[in-house]
Amino acid sequence: MTTSQPALTPDADYRRVAATGVSAAFGTFGELLQGVLPEEDGDFLVTLPVARWAMARFELVPDSAALQVWPAHKRKALWLTSMIMEDARRSAGGVLKIDSTIPEGKGLASSSADLVATARAVANALDEPMPPRRIESYLARIEPTDGVLYPAVVAFHHRSVRLRARLGSLPSMAVVSVDEGGAVDTVDFNSIPKPFTAADKREYARLLERVTRAVARQDLAEVGRVATASARMNQVLRHKWSLDPLIDICREVGGLGVVVGHSGTTLGILLNTAAPHCPGQLAVAAQACQELVGNVTVYRTLSFP
């Protein structure tokens, strides 16, 4: 979405034209699955889009060469803006404003959503094409990235920043979430050597096949089983003390499974919102999670046409 004065053309004096671009990107609740496949560039994840967003607004500033970002700590978004401006051969300055409802450092793709929203907002202001592959090429120069630029559940190579496959969409689920506290830096986490064996990698390949079929069949129970298996396997990389108790709570309330931020601090119980007993399940699960960890947030997953 763009609002501007007369459209920019290659021959226009864009320094005299003020334009604004806005866009948004959703976050994810951790990953349904994350691990390493038995192939080159095997690091991958499967997204779980949720109804939390990062919103970006970029305003070109005529007769200025300075780029600014608010909040000031969103330096990666400012770096991305400068790359796009340079490639578009625009010497004007601008102000980038990001407003996000996604908690930072928790494994919910907050940084990825910031960057995707920024790329689209800047492109809108400049009237530049910004297809997904172009966004991926920029983000690969900045940091490992979730696949939040695709409106679907996707398998994504987060280290090399490229799409593996669109798996489709799932019916809406509730995620009764807890946060063990602290924050995790995505770049630091992805620099840790992964101690997965050849057998582990084969198991991740099997889990990817299972979740691919489950999404195609809209099989939420199988999706939950794969998410729980992935959470367990991730314990060797980032141990979560509350995982086993949360799996017990999930079993007691009849939940689908447990999903985690593999590179973050969050865990959540998946519930089928279409089930008639979901409100009761949610209330019992939330109370038990509150007693276990001391904080509870309920997220809703996104479905796509």
Image (cartoon, helix red, strand yellow):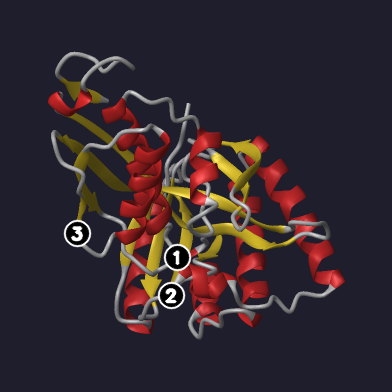
Residue 177, quarter of the rendered image: bottom left
Q: Does residue 162 appear left or right of residue 124 in this picture? A: right
* Secondary element type, mark 2: loop
Which residue is more in the foreground, 11 or 179?
11
Q: Check disc 2: other Cα within 10 Å, few if <14, some if 14-19, many if 20+.
A: some
Q: Which residue is mark 3?
A: 71
Q: Check disc 3: other Cα within 10 Å, few if <14, some if 14-19, many if 20+.
A: few
Q: Earlier in the sequence, mark 3 or mark 2?
A: 3
Q: Amino acid at mark 3?
A: Pro
Q: Using the numbered discs, state the Cα–Cα distance from disc 1 to disc 2 in whole angstroms.
A: 7 Å
Q: Residue at x 26, y 18 (%)?
A: 8
Nearer the observer, disc 1 or disc 3? 3
Q: Does residue 134 appear left or right of residue 94 in this picture? A: right
Q: Is residue 172 above or below residue 281?
A: above
* Secondary element type, mark 1: loop
Q: Quadrant of the N terminus?
A: top left
Q: Amino acid at mark 2?
A: Val
Q: Which residue is mark 2?
A: 184
Q: Is residue 2 among the parts visible in the rendering?
A: yes
Q: Earlier in the sequence, mark 1 or mark 3?
A: 3
Percent position of residue 292, x then y = 38, 83
Q: Residue at x 66, y 36 (%)?
A: 216
Q: Check disc 1: other Cα within 10 Å, few if <14, some if 14-19, many if 20+.
A: many
Q: Using the numbered discs, state the Cα–Cα distance from disc 1 to disc 3 in whole angstroms.
A: 20 Å
Q: Residue at x 49, y 30 (%)?
A: 131
* Secondary element type, mark 3: loop
Which residue is more in the foreground, 296 or 116?
116
Q: Residue at x 39, y 63 (%)?
A: 176
Q: Using the numbered discs, state the Cα–Cα distance from disc 3 to disc 2 in whole angstroms.
A: 19 Å
Percent position of residue 161, x then y = 59, 50
